[in-house]
Amino acid sequence: MPTTTAPLSSAEEPALVHHVPVRAADRAEAAALPLSHRFTLGQQISGVQAAFFAQHGFLVFGGVAQRAELDLILSELEAVQARWIAEDRKKINGIPLFVGKDPDGRPFVQRFTFTSMFSEPLRRFVLDPRFEPVRQMVGPEARVGHDEHDGVVINRYINVPGSVYPRLGWHTDGLRDVAYLRKPQAMFNVGLHFDEISAADGGLRLIPGSHTQGLWDMAFRKLYFLDHRPDPAEIAVETQPGDLTVHDGRLWHRVAQSPHSGWRSLRRSMYVPYQTGPLATKAEDSPTPIYHTIGRALRWFKKRG
């Protein structure tokens, strides 16, 4: 789930957002780091982290959540799924549910939306003070949009017959702004990862630095969602359980399909929406946003070749 904020600062010294100072030494140190570098999330975003993000458009923070916390979230997810399936839910606050099959042929929710509204432990977790530096990245006035846009989103990619979400094609999250006829702004995807995923397992791919592209490249560099081909400039974002990733939604990114099948192919991630600006709350009778309608049409065409 993308998080939206105001355009990036134009301060004399380069900044991430909202007055994170970056020195020349920070930029030099960040430029020397490999793209696979894993940072530690501290009490604030450092100058080196700010410089790395400004240059490449993403950060990986290792070990932000503990195994027991991940297990609790996954347990809550099973309870939410059981409730929604029993209620025969098709949408949550106007946002379509992606329901496929698990390796045992049972109904399997593959994209949860507004999840923290259905689980108090999950709501408490995403409001934990350890995430304050990430909120400050978005802005001092940023809030967790539990009931805004798509809310807290949890994705479960799996490669089995009957899966409706084994992969996700190339896209930028600027498409949402374009769909509403507004200029794409800085966005942040803040993701918590539940599984050990290496490049050989599929998973998140992104093109470093593509967040600085112009509107033409954002709109036409690739065929949105239908193009799954590897790009020579892409990198695989490898994660361990409990890792937190932040990437600029204007980057070109995709989720590669796992070469494995069955439960071994499962990849789970949670995206927390930090919002700024006017409230954009959703209710049970909210209409389906146009960007989801476009996405559904693209998936329909893809299914038919």
Image: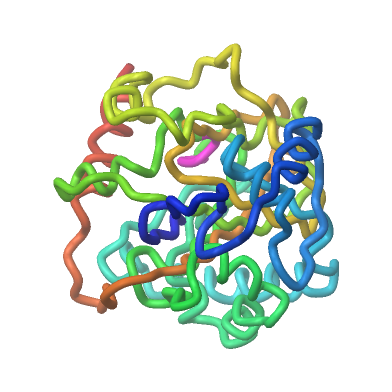
The one nearer the camera, 51 or 65, is: 51
**Residue 137 pos. (x, y %):** 56, 63
Main SS class of the magenta portion in the image: loop
Tell me if residue 296 comes above or below residue 227 in the rendering.
Answer: below
**Residue 120 pos. (x, y %):** 58, 87
Instruction: Say whether residue 176 is visible.
Output: yes
Determine the residue positioned at 41% across, 50% down. 186
The one nearer the camera, 11 or 161, is: 11
Determine the residue positioned at 46% across, 74% down. 142
Assign the C terminus to one quadrant of the image: top left
Instruction: Say whether residue 71 is visible.
Output: no
**Residue 129 pos. (x, y %):** 69, 82
Tell me if residue 243 comes above or below residue 285 in the rendering.
Answer: above
Q: Is residue 263 left or right of residue 56?
A: right
Colour option used: rainbow
The one nearer the camera, 36 or 80, is: 36
Q: Quadrant of residue 303?
A: top left
Determine the residue positioned at 43% across, 50% down. 10
Q: Is residue 167 left or right of residue 38?
A: left
Residue at the extreme top of the image, as rendered: 232
**Residue 193 pos. (x, y %):** 70, 54
Q: Which residues are magenta?
A: 163-167
Q: Is residue 290 left or right of residue 151?
A: left
Determine the residue positioned at 77% across, 43% down. 25
Q: Quadrant of residue 30?
A: top right
Q: Is residue 300 left or right of residue 113?
A: left
Q: Verify whether residue 257 appears in magenta.
A: no
Tell me if residue 143 comes above or below residue 63 in the rendering.
Answer: below
- Total number of numbered labels? 0
